[in-house]
Amino acid sequence: MTISHTEENYLKAIFKLAEKGQKSVSTNAIAAHMQTAAASVTDMLKRLAEKDLIAHEKYRGVQLSASGERMATALIRKHRLWEVFLTEKLGFSWDEVHDYAEQLEHVQGETLINRLDDFLGNPHFDPHGDPIPDAEGRWSFRPQALLATLQVGDKGVITGVEDHRPEFLQYLQQQGLVLGATLELLERFAFDQSVRIRAGATQIITLSEKATQNIYVKIS
């Protein structure tokens, strides 16, 4: 089945929204994610339903069908592999790769992607710490928690980020809070739930609650 780039983007959006706990994804949620009008979303959902890529119940939201989920998973696999390639082989920083990967993810050819995967050493996670599904659609997971949930005295290693916006990634880079960086939670301020952490051996940093809600840590 041939589908357009826009249709692929909708499948990926529905997958990611469902991944956050929404069993049935609403039209309004998709519209907000895609930054488009609800009427445009409704038209697209009709097209996807006609191709049996989603199950759409009026007033109850949508779910991906088995074939829709396979397509969305393949798209995410391509996107994240290209992000690894761009950072590891072409020297792009983690805040630069998303837009390029958005274009490259639509390149067709399963053989190409499988060879790319092998060339990169079959990575399980992308530069932002997100899992990369394998050729069979299987995901790799690891124990991690948001920094916001840690207790004073907890130590860990940064494993991923929830917010992929360039300005947030640049901020973390400037603070040295990149994947693999070690930290210890020293203090949480009751006033606004901001925290003071030790990064590495000596650096003391204060982070807002918003930042802590977007940093994943594996507690050691």
Image (cartoon, rainbow, N blue to C red):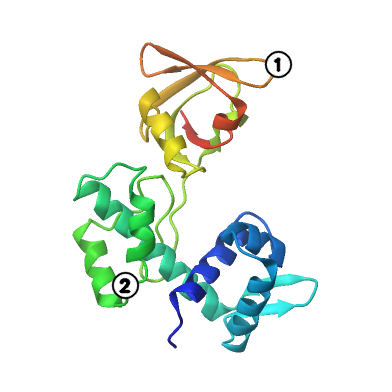
x, y percent for residue 94: 34, 43
Secondary structure, mark 2, is loop
Q: Pick whichever, 92 or 218, lies toward us.
A: 92
Marks 1/2: CA–CA distance: 49 Å
Which residue carries the number 1 mark?
Answer: 190
- The answer to which quarter of the image holds residue 166 is top left
Image height of 91 relative to 131, above or below: above
What residue is shown at x 56% (from left), y 30% (from top)? 212
Instruction: Say if mark 1 contacts mark 2, CB within 8 Å.
Output: no
Q: In this image, 105 relative to 151: left or right?
A: left
* Circle 1 residues within 10 Å: few <14, some 14–19, many ≥20: few
Which residue carries the number 2 mark?
Answer: 107
What residue is shown at x 42% (from left), y 68% (from top)? 75
x, y percent for residue 197: 50, 17
What residue is shown at x 37% (from left), y 19% (from top)? 200
- Residue 81's label in the rendered image is none
x, y percent for residue 6: 49, 73
Residue 125 in sight = no
Q: In this image, 118 relative to 52: left or right?
A: left
* Callout 2 amino acid: Val
* Callout 1 amino acid: Ala
Instruction: Please name which of the two marks, 1 or 2, marks the residue nearer to the observer.
Output: 2
Secondary structure, mark 1, is loop
| Label whose residue precedes the other's in the sequence (1 or 2) | 2
Quarter of the picture containing the N terminus is bottom left
